[in-house]
Image (tube, rainbow, N blue to C red):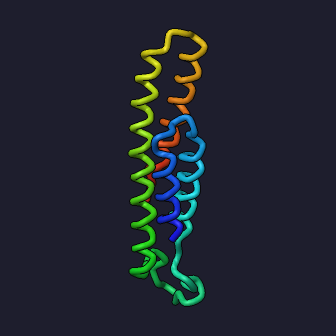
Amino acid sequence: DCARHAQELLENARENWDGHNVLLVVTLFLRAVFEHIVPSGSLEEESPGASSTSQTPQVQRSQHEVARVLRFSRKIAKEWVKKIGEATDRCTQEAGTQKLLAKTAAVASTGVLTFMDH
């Protein structure tokens, strides 16, 4: 359910790269959710010698949904980097160019956060 809400937030923010903090916050939230999805009661039910990496189908589905929205977040970040780059090319003032380059770095960094090491 949180993945669906995150997707909606991203879709609403997709055309406004100036509000890149929405992309950052949603991405950080999704990473935290992805990393902390565990089967309910799994710690209590685990028997000695059992693998702690076993996951229920529901947990796997949840992780899959969160990963899907993280990929959508990455796609938006890539689109925004391209659009900001185009705006930077058109910019004629040094101060404006510097602001756009800083925004490019921020959005690109958010895109990098969508890659998981799992």
Above or below residue 37? Residue 90 is above
Examine the image and state in which quarter residue 86 appears. Answer: top left
Q: Is residue 82 left or right of residue 27?
A: left
Q: Is residue 35 left or right of residue 54?
A: right
The total of numbered circles placed on residues is 0
Residue visible at 51% across and 37% down in the picture: 17
Residue visible at 46% across and 28% down in the picture: 84
Examine the image and state in which quarter residue 66 appears. Answer: bottom left
Q: Is residue 94 left or right of residue 118?
A: right
Question: The C terminus is located in which quarter?
Answer: bottom left
Residue visible at 54% across and 16% down in the picture: 97
Residue visible at 53% across and 87% down in the picture: 46
Name the foreground residue: 15 vs 59.
15
Q: Position of residue 6 (x, y in %)?
A: 52, 59
Above or below residue 33? Residue 85 is above
Q: Position of residue 50 (x, y in %)?
A: 47, 84
Name the foreground residue: 86 vs 62.
86
Q: Position of residue 41 (x, y in %)?
A: 57, 86
Name the foreground residue: 105 vs 7.
7
Q: Position of residue 108 (x, y in %)?
A: 48, 36
Above or below residue 53? Residue 44 is below
